[in-house]
Amino acid sequence: MTRRSPLPTIRSPSTHTEIVMSPSSRKVVAIALLPSVATMLFVQACGGGGLALAQEAADPIEGVWENVITQRDCNSQAALATFRGMQVYHRGGTLADTSGAPTTTRSAGFGLWQRSGNEITTRFRFFRYNADGSLAGSTVVTRTVTPAADGMTVAGHSQTALLDVAGNEVARGCATDTGTRFR
């Protein structure tokens, strides 16, 4: 008759023998597993890992777009100036924006985007600087674009609010634009 230990045992899958764990061994194993269990619970609490996010369906607007923007008089729609810009639509609804303006006069812009049917509405902010490098204020742009059926071009219009350093609106602007997917 085989005598069984009163201590918990683990059966080894390879040798089919029982391994007896002393109370101090159980404590060491529990302490060693604690960080792994805590990490797993944290990842689950945050909605899963990167793989879970990667499995969401991509929106066709996601990616890098090169734009030609024409500033317009808001009343007459007369063209005032034309410049280039780029936008990156990130999965999850965030947006990065830049223009052909020198980085000494304008920062990159950051904001959000949302789809409603075939239209994409964006809202982003960038900072403006004076010639001496001091902050002149910021600009908030609200833009609506409509992608073409081929998914390679967009056409849009926007309204801008120029804000002073204190956040007070000092001017408004309008623009139209066309964009092409960067490849």
Image (cartoon, helix red, strand yellow):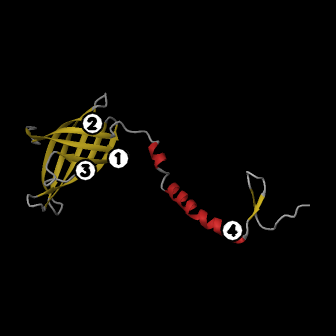
Q: Residue at x 31, y 28 (%)?
A: 150
Position of 116 with respect to 69 (left or right) is right
In the rendered structure, find residue 93 and report the number of the disc placed on it: 1
- Category of crowding for the residue at label 1, using alpha-carbon neighbours closer than 10 angstroms: few (below 14), some (14–19), many (at least 20): some
Q: Nearer the viewer, mark 4 or mark 1?
A: 4
Q: Residue at x 15, y 62 (%)?
A: 165
Position of 183 with respect to 29 (left or right) is left
- When the figure is inspected, residue 2 is found, relative to residue 72, above or below; the finding is below
- Category of crowding for the residue at label 3, using alpha-carbon neighbours closer than 10 angstroms: few (below 14), some (14–19), many (at least 20): many
* Badge 3 element: strand
Q: Which residue is mark 3?
A: 124
Q: CA distance from mark 3 to mark 1?
A: 12 Å
Q: Nearer the viewer, mark 2 or mark 1?
A: 2
Kind of residue sitting beneath label 3: Phe
Sequence-wise, the earlier of marks 4 and 3 is: 4
- Category of crowding for the residue at label 4, using alpha-carbon neighbours closer than 10 angstroms: few (below 14), some (14–19), many (at least 20): few
Kind of residue sitting beneath label 4: Ser
Q: Residue at x 31, y 43 (%)?
A: 89
